[in-house]
Image (tube, helix red, strand yellow):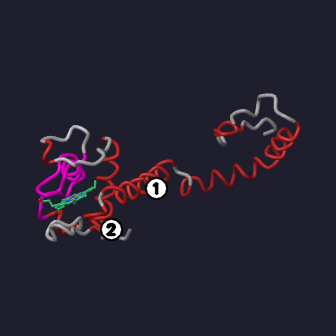
Amino acid sequence: MGELNLNGFDSHEGNVQNPVDQKQKQGVKLMKSLAPPLMAAFLALSPFFISPVSLGQEIDVQRGATLFRRTCIGCHDGGGNIIQPGATLFSKDLLRNGVATEEEIYRVTYYGKGRMPGFGENCTPRGQCTFGARLQEDEIKVLAEFVKSQADLGWPN
Ligand code: HEC
């Protein structure tokens, strides 16, 4: 267990083999002596706290919330709809209006619908699209996921 490879422990530690100054070397030594117990704790906890999937989802929710605040909140604050009260982003309206899946939410956000402008880069016809900044496809995807998950939870955010 003397030569524990820290590369797999944290990708930012990938330079342990390179020449480093004395202070950093000591730090690495300390890391090595602490590594076995830390590794044990890391392995024990990782399925719950450091699983890449839940971390990725957490990041997407935050990204979705940021995009939503920037682009949608003017009309859809809290998941509502200030222009058309029967077309909120709550599940019961989404279901009734046939916009309950992520794909449908994506489509409405990309191309618009009625008095809602579309935000997709290639949204057509022009009159149905926003005069403001367009959104990238992956941004619309993150937004659709965010709206769907918020609808499922009753708009806690
Ligand atoms: C200028 C106001 C406005 C903005 C900004 C806006 N919307 Fe809308 N949105 C509407 C209106 C109006 C409707 C109802 C359209 C209809 O059904 O004819 C709607 C409907 C929707 C629906 C379908 C809701 C339902 O129950 O039928 C979704 C999903 C949606 N918007 C998502 C978004 C997202 C995501 C954004 C931000 C990228 C956004 N909207 C920005 C006005 C807006």
Front-most of residues 67 and 62 = 67
- Residue 20, by quadrant, is top right
Q: Earlier in the sequence, mark 1 or mark 2?
A: 1
Highlighted range, magenta = 96-119
Please say if 80 is above or below 9. Answer: below
State the mark number for residue 38. Answer: none
Q: Is residue 115 magenta?
A: yes
Q: Residue furthest front?
A: 131
Q: Amino acid at mark 2?
A: Leu
Q: Secondary structure at mark 1?
A: helix
Q: Local crowd at mark 2 within 10 Å, few (<14), some, or many (≥20)?
A: few
- Residue 89, by quadrant, is bottom left
Picture coordinates of residue 18, whole percent (x, y) = 77, 28
Residue occupying the point 63% across, 51% down: 43
Front-most of residues 131 and 24 = 131
- Quadrant for ligand 1 reads bottom left
Question: Mark 2 sits on what residue?
Answer: 153
Question: Mark 1 sits on what residue?
Answer: 58
Picture coordinates of residue 154, whole percent (x, y) = 30, 70
